[in-house]
Amino acid sequence: MLAIEVKNLRKSYQGKVAVDDLSLEVPPGVIYGLLGPNGAGKTTTIRCICTLLQPDRGTIKVCGLTEERAIRQKLGYVAQEVALDKVLTGRELLELQGALYHIPPREIPKAIDRVIDLVQLGEYADKRSGTYSGGIRKRLDLAAGLLHQPEVLVLDEPTVGLDIQSRLAIWEFLQKLRASGITILLTSHYLEEIDALADRVAIIDRGKLIAEGTPDQLKQNLGGDRVTVKLREFTELELAQKGMAVLAQLPFVRSSLLNPAQGNAINLIVNREAGVQQAIETALSEQGLPLFSYSQSRPSLDDVFLAITGQTILDAELALLEQKR
């Protein structure tokens, strides 16, 4: 039985489609990542799964269940924004959460001690939450989501705004949860987070599923390496376009795109073969074009997004921001 099954989900706001005919299958006991730019429909999708939003159409099952109350008993949900009463201690907030989950009063203290130990919150539990750092606040939020021992934990951007050390601590904790048998569905626009954590990943853009599989499968499907070429430290657009036109004609180049965020760097996906760098240098030299820098690496999930949509995740986010202005 699947942990989460979504079929043909559609959700719109005031006539604008946020999620469009989306289908997902999340196996039990895995970390499943939803990757995409801000505004792609990730948060809307998980809010529908968590019964916080009513879909326009489509079906959702969690652990084989479709009734909203039954689904909520199986799910723990940690939203992107941590909402805490800064006057209350961590323990007091968990007591309130236990009552909201309808945990029998006699069992609440034991459940609280269990999650405090699980997320290593012991030295902070009886301090006011207003004194917590961002990483400790996130630990408390995770504790609240796990208090009723859910089979599925849903996390919306679990490390947004955290420093590197706190992010790595959350990653380690989520991996331990997976090892204990809990299914985790998380959204993120951090490529390295999904790559490091997810057993499977669904890439979403403009409310649609555009790719799904393991991170390695998605990258291998590109069939080549990533090459980044800069003609100058910051290349004028006309010069960069000329360089890209030259390189796009090379037989081993599978796709090409300018990246304004990298100073109009030329991003290529190339066949994995010998002599690529020399051929690129020669092609540019023959046209009298300069070469400032060259790098070649295995493809990333951003390259997968680029190959399918024609833009990077960052470019997609910038485009959405422009639309809202």
Image (spheres, helix red, strand yellow):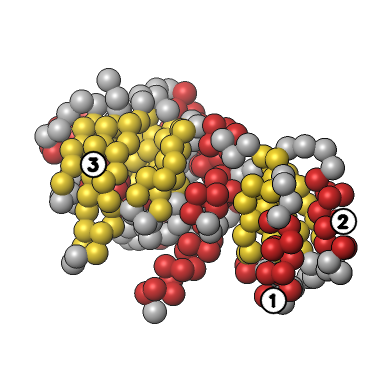
The mark lying in front, picked from 3 and 1, is 1
Residue 62 image-quadrant placement: top left
Pointer 1 residue: 238
Q: Is the residue under label 2 in contact with that under label 3 (CB below 8 Å)?
A: no
Judging from the image, what secondary structure is the residue with disc 2 in? helix
Pointer 2 residue: 282
Instruction: Give the percent coordinates (x, y) of residue 300.
Output: 61, 44
Q: Label 1: how many residues lie within 10 Å, few (<14), some (14-19) or many (20+)?
A: few
Q: Earlier in the sequence, mark 3 or mark 2?
A: 3
The residue located at (35%, 49%) in the rendering is 208
> How far apart are the alpha carbons under marks 2 and 1?
20 Å
* Residue 261 higher or lower than 172, as above or below: below
| Circle 1: residue type | Glu
Closest to the observer, 215 or 220: 220
Pointer 3 residue: 8
Judging from the image, what secondary structure is the residue with disc 1 in? helix
